[in-house]
Each structure stands twice: as structure tokens, then as C-alpha cells.
Image (cartoon, rainbow, N blue to C red):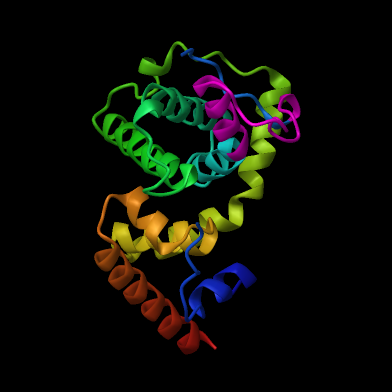
Amino acid sequence: MSQPEARIATTGHEHQDKSTERAPVSTIRERPVAARARPPSTPLEEFEQVYLRNVDVLMGYFARRCRDPQTVADLTSETFVRAVEGFARFDPRRGSDRAWLFGIAARVFARYCEESAGGRDAMARLGGHRPLDEDEIEELAERIDAEHEGAALMRRYARLPVVERSAIELVDLEGLTPKEAALALGVSGVAFRKRLSRARSRLRKEHHSNE
């Protein structure tokens, strides 16, 4: 059993709560190391900082689900397109921008899966996003490989109900608080904590039985 898997399975407590243009998603080599040092003065600059703080995390989310670099890039880009369109409605008092973005990413991926299952070209509607060049494809392929362990864990936990599996991923892999993860999944805090507790209990039992 891998170290991340053992850590998830043996977790016994929840984290403490912490307090417009279609631009293609840039790959890591193209992005600044950090967001702007000065406070944002416009909504566009504010969204840019949200983007810079979260783009790598969102790429990791999709890299655990897709093996094709172009699809990972397109789904990440689609998430930020939807985010910038709804940014005026984002309320940081309800939760972090990361939790908000994970909620959008989950809906983007669900729609992608539905269209793929229905035999439709799920990426055709993303035709406005630019194709990756060879260096970007290679870089994203490396990122997908880096997420291999996390992807294997999610496949192993595929027997869990979807919300329980997502709860484990968002809290124990991505580091969201239970409150933020509940917001991302669109469930109540009480319901989320119960599902997270059940998922952890199941994983602890399996972990101990394999020792």
C-alpha cells in the first residue's frame, strides 16, 4: 500500500477550517512563478490571481481522470472560461476560490463524461481552445504521469459512492476543509461530514485487514 493510500486510510480527524476573454490555459513553463505582489485593482486582475493560485491544482484534478494531454488542457481551460464568466457571482464569504473552482471542474468533467458516453464528441464544443504544441504536450504528459499514484487511488476507491470518493479526494488529497469540499460538491456540511466519516471508516477497515 502506498504512503498516500495509508495516510488517507488511517486519517482519524478532519482538517481544521481555514479561513472577459477566453484565454488558453498556459502550461507550467509559461506561467509566472507567483501572482502579482501588489493587490489587484480590477476584477480582471483579481481573477488573474485566482487563476495563478489554482491552475496547477486544477490540471492535477483532470490529469487524474484523463490520459490525453490535450483533453487535460481543454478541460482545465473550460473550467476557467466558466469561472471568469461567473466570477462576479463568486462570494469569498461562502468559501475559498479553490473550493468554488473544484465545484465548476466537477460539473465540467461530468458533462464531458456524459457526452462521451452518449457517443458525442465531447471536445468538439471546446474547439475555440488552442491546440498544444509538442513541448506543451510533453510537459502535460509528464504531469499526467506524476498524478499516476493519485489516479490509481481513485480507481481503487471507485467502489465507494461518488460523493464519498470525492470527499476523500478533495479533503485528503487536495487539502480542502470539509466546509469548502461540501461547497464544491453542492451538499450540506452535515451530509458531507457523514459521508466523509463513512468513507474513512471503510478505508481504515480495509487498511487494517490488509496489514
Q: Nearer the viewer, residue 39 or 160?
A: 39
Image location (x, y in percent) of residue 140? 65, 33
Toward which corner of the image does residue 113 lie, by quadrant? top left
Tell me what residue is drawn at x 68 percent, y 25 percent. Answer: 136
Q: Does 94 sit above or below residue 152?
A: above
Q: Is residue 159 magenta?
A: no
Image location (x, y in percent) of residue 95? 41, 49
Q: Does 133 sit above or below residue 167?
A: above
Q: Nearer the viewer, residue 145 or 125?
A: 125
Image location (x, y in percent) of residue 122? 35, 24
Task: Tell me the magenta residue range.
Answer: 29-53
Quadrant of the frame with the C terminus: bottom right
Tell me what residue is drawn at x 53 percent, y 40 percent. Answer: 58
In the picture provided, is 139 more to the left or to the right than 131? Answer: right
Toward which corner of the image does residue 117 lie, by quadrant? top left
Image location (x, y in percent) of residue 81? 44, 22
Quadrant of the frame with the N terminus: bottom right
